[in-house]
Image (tube, grey):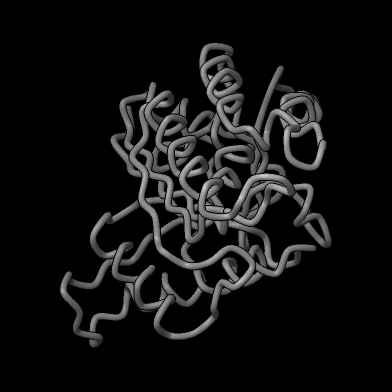
Amino acid sequence: MSGIHVLAIGAHAGDLDLTAGAVLAQQVMNGDRATLLHLTLGERGHPRTPVAEYAKQKREEAETFADRIGAGVRFLDYEDGLLPEDDDVKMRVGDLIRELRPDVILTHWSASIHKDHSRTHRIVQDARFFGGLKTLEREHPAYWASELYYADNWEDAEGFAPDVFVDLREEAYEVWSQAITGYAFARGETYGFPYVDYYRALTIVRGAPAGFRRAQAFAAPKGSRDLRLTHFGPNNENGPNNEN
């Protein structure tokens, strides 16, 4: 057991649940902590359900997912599609990094067809900086999250080149695979995209080249290529030296 804390920061409830949820479930099984932070609920993502009603539904779905994989969950109150990119949101996320003190942060890749995703990428970059800035006085003391990785999302595919492959045990995959079906959008009930089928299949696609039956893949800001891991954090035989 590595005893670490992984913080997954997504633009919308469901984003990191899909792309990193199996890894989060496995970290929890290893005795680690995992927390999902949703900057918005993704409440404008249903073509038939009113926004306020879908917001309530998404929050409940996010809480249920986190509970099923044994993770914590936090929410900020920004609006889907209208996520700002200013110092206020960056400071708020930075404050949560100081409070939660994660060893590892997972978030979106820089390029996306959804502006909330690309904004979240940049928000997290600056929030990590603000979180670790010792001369910036906030409620909690400064804290530097030592590892940062970007999740494998079909909406964030432009320029994404995975170099971190986390081997998934079958039990972790099954927990995640069942938990993710709690999201209506993941079941294809909003716009029809087969999210569950896609991301289940992607675990095989990403695992095979790394020599694993299943894996979830991430990109590192810098470091060695083709990293194969069993968990994030210290004491990984093939782990990255990622002190950016």
Residue displayed at 41% across by 64% down? 77
Comparing 185 with 102, the one in front is 185
Q: Is residue 43 left or right of residue 30?
A: right
The image shows residue 158, relative to residue 64, as above or below, that is below
**Looking at the rendering, which quadrant does residue 217 occupy?**
top right
Comparing 43 with 127, the one in front is 43
The image shows residue 154, relative to residue 213, as above or below, that is below
- Does the rendering let one see residue 93? yes
Residue displayed at 51% across by 17% down? 175
Q: Position of residue 108 (x, y in %)?
A: 62, 58
Q: Is residue 183 left or right of residue 96?
A: right
- Does the rendering let one see residue 206? no
**Looking at the rendering, which quadrant does residue 235 occupy?**
top left
Q: Position of residue 109 (x, y in %)?
A: 67, 60
Residue displayed at 39% across by 42% down? 234
Comparing 39 with 201, the one in front is 39
Q: Position of residue 170 (x, y in %)?
A: 58, 12
Q: Position of residue 218 (x, y in %)?
A: 65, 46
Residue displayed at 49% across by 55% down? 9
